[in-house]
């Protein structure tokens, strides 16, 4: 039981931090909202989707996924910062569960995602996004997004523990997440890409997540080159598989890294 | 023994020490001597490559969880959350020690009061001075009244006033009966706070004892006289006669000195002879060796030289 309360105290710490420095929360919501507006009005006019309701219907799931993917960098740099300041040593010298600090942080980042996704959803609605999959499916899509963010924050934990400097880890995280989110179906159909990239894009977890969300929001989603392949036919299941895979790899790796930080 | 893989530097090399319950042991050494590594091993943050250690009778390698319940650690850098207030930090750590909400709040208030931080309790740590941060960090380390406290260079980087305040707080804790292992590179600090001192260099213990015995090991008192340059030779003759050993002349400092066995008697003898010879030294006195001298004598190099 203690392991859970310990983790929750760490989560509470993160919320306290946000209340002491509200700018962090403000800017982490402004950025995705800015993406919504930019893509909606800059590319929205020139990308012909054939989709009723226009580009914004395809765009919103893409931006939702991109945003939760970017929390990886926040998780990683937050943790790296704690380590740089020696705070980790204090936590590690306390009689608390070994997993508390990292579990607490992943939970905190998920809470932050709830706020960010809510604000984005409202912004999307204002610029014309209308999910048509029904309330239940829409809610399920958001749960899906949170779960994806949670899974990814474990890769952030690992990166944060492995890194030596908070600034470096932030840059590296972006170097990974940025191409991953753009080499996907998030913002444009994959059919415009060179063939090898198409294959990559369509097996990319970001694409399966986007496709899954689109499905839940009531849209048809077409994959290009690999139409008929497993991920294009079953984006929901593939995404669940990816999340479990990510957690199965990175949770034990991270906890081990944290405990062994002493070696 | 602890060897770091990078570059195969031996941080600790057969280091061995023990602290008696309720006393203060100071681990004294220059930067890189292995002080922090020692503390990190004892505080369960680091595993040694070989060897063993027990803290409060508990094996740190076999039962680190149990060790963590009886120790407090305050490191070289204030390990608190800087964006949070002092109060937030102490309450959070109290809760992580499983004190419960009410008790954590009460203890936080009590500690802030005791360490003269009540006024800044609701300000983010970022706005604290160096001394205030260290005090808060120490407060966080003693939330559950640990039996054993590790302080790793608690005053490094503090100004003289901050250091005095920190010493006051530490003395209070020691009077309260805590067993303390304190590392420092300030000889004065060890002299001031510790019952016993262990001098380490390059991961090895090179001397151990009370500050008095260490000083004695290096040699007793010296009689030192400062005079006008023209009188150096004459004074040296007198000092040599009084002390029975040949006096050392430092022309740059215009000083003449020699080790003496019976300090006060030699001083009086010297004064009488000077008076008879109508010599008027600028300064005369008995010098006890400082711990700096101890270090120099033990390691053959000054404390600052090693990086």
Image (cartoon, rainbow, N blue to C red):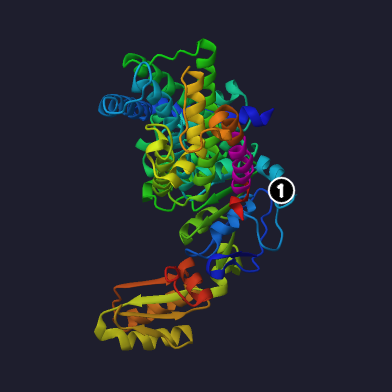
Q: Mark 1 points at which residue?
A: B56
Asked if residue A159 is among those painted magenta in the image, a careful observer would answer no
The answer to whether residue B148 is left or right of residue B165 is right
Query: In the current view of this chain or complex, which residue is farthest to the top?
Result: A135
Question: Dot 1: few (<14), some (14–19), or many (≥20) neighbours within 10 Å?
Answer: some
Q: Residue drawn at (66%, 32%), measured in percent from left and top?
A: A3
Q: In which quarter of the image is residue A174?
A: top left
Q: In which quarter of the image is residue B270?
A: bottom left
Q: What element carries label 1?
A: loop
Question: Image quadrant for the N terminus of chain B?
Answer: bottom right
Asked if residue A246 is among those painted magenta in the image, a careful observer would answer yes
The answer to whether residue A192 is left or right of residue B282 is right
Tell me residue B204's x, y (percent): 60, 69
Q: In this view, does B280 lie above or below B177?
A: below
Q: In which quarter of the image is residue B82?
A: top left
Tell me residue A97's x, y (percent): 65, 37
What is the tally of numbered marks visible in this picture?
1
Q: Is residue B52 above or below residue A66?
A: below
Highlighted magenta segment, given as a residue range: A243-258
Q: Residue drawn at (73%, 47%), measured in percent from left and top?
A: B63
Task: Give whichever of B151, A172 is nearer the camera.
Answer: A172
Q: Residue drawn at (61%, 56%), measured in percent from left and top?
A: A263
The answer to whether residue B181 is left or right of residue B87 is right
Tell me residue B158's x, y (percent): 39, 50
Task: Give whichever of A124, B226 is nearer the camera.
Answer: A124
């Amino acid at each position: 039981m203690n392991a859970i309360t310990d983790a929750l105290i760490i989560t509470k710490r993160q919320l306290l931090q946000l209340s002491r420095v509200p700018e962090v929360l403000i800017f982490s919501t402004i950025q995705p909202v800015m993406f919504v507006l930019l893509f909606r009005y800059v590319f929205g006019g020139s990308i012909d989707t054939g989709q009723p309701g226009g580009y914004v219907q395809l765009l919103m799931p893409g931006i939702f996924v991109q945003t939760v993917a970017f929390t990886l960098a926040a998780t990683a740099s937050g943790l790296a910062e704690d380590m740089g300041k020696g705070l980790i040593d204090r936590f590690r010298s306390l009689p608390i569960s070994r997993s508390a600090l990292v579990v607490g942080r992943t939970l905190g980042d998920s809470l932050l995602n709830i706020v960010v996704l809510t604000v984005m959803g409202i912004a999307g609605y204002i610029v014309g996004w209308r999910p048509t999959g029904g309330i239940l499916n829409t809610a399920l899509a958001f749960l899906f997004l949170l779960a994806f963010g949670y899974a990814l924050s474990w890769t952030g934990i690992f990166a944060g523990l492995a890194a030596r400097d908070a600034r470096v880890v932030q840059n590296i995280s972006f170097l990974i997440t940025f191409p991953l989110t753009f080499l996907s179906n998030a913002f444009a159909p994959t059919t415009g890409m060179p063939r090898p990239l198409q294959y990559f894009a369509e097996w990319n977890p970001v694409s399966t997540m986007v496709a899954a969300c689109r499905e839940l929001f009531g849209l048809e989603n077409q994959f290009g080159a690999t139409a008929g392949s497993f991920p294009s036919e079953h984006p929901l299941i593939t995404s669940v598989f990816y999340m479990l895979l990510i957690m199965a790899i990175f949770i034990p790796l991270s906890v081990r890294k944290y405990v062994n930080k002493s070696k | 023994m602890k060897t770091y893989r990078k570059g195969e530097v031996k941080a600790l090399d057969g280091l061995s020490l023990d602290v008696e319950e309720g006393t203060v042991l100071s681990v004294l050494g220059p930067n890189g001597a292995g002080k922090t590594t020692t503390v990190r091993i004892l505080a369960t943050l680091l595993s040694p490559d070989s060897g063993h250690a027990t803290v409060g009778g508990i094996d740190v390698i076999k039962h680190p969880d149990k060790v963590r319940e009886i120790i407090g650690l305050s490191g070289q850098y204030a390990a608190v959350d800087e964006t949070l207030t002092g109060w937030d930090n102490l309450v959070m750590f109290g809760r992580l020690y499983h004190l419960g909400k009410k008790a954590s709040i009460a203890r936080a208030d009590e500690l802030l009061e005791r360490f003269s931080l009540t006024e800044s309790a609701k300000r983010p740590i970022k706005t604290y001075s160096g001394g205030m941060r260290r005090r808060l960090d120490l407060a966080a380390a003693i939330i559950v009244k640990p039996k054993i406290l590790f302080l790793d260079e608690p005053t490094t980087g503090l100004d003289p006033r901050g250091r005095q305040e920190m010493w006051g707080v530490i003395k209070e804790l020691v009077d309260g009966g805590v067993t303390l292992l304190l590392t420092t590179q300030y000889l004065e600090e060890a002299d001031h706070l510790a019952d016993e001192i262990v001098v380490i260099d390059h991961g090895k213990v090179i001397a151990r004892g009370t500050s008095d015995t260490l000083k004695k090991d290096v040699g007793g008192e010296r009689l030192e006289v400062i005079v006008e340059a023209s009188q150096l030779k004459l004074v040296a003759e007198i000092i040599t006669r009084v002390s029975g050993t040949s006096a050392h002349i430092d022309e740059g400092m215009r000083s003449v000195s020699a080790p003496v066995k019976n300090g006060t008697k030699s001083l009086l003898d010297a004064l009488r002879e000077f008076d008879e010879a109508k010599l008027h030294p600028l300064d005369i006195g008995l010098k006890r060796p400082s711990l700096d001298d101890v270090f120099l004598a033990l390691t053959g190099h000054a404390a600052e030289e090693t990086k």
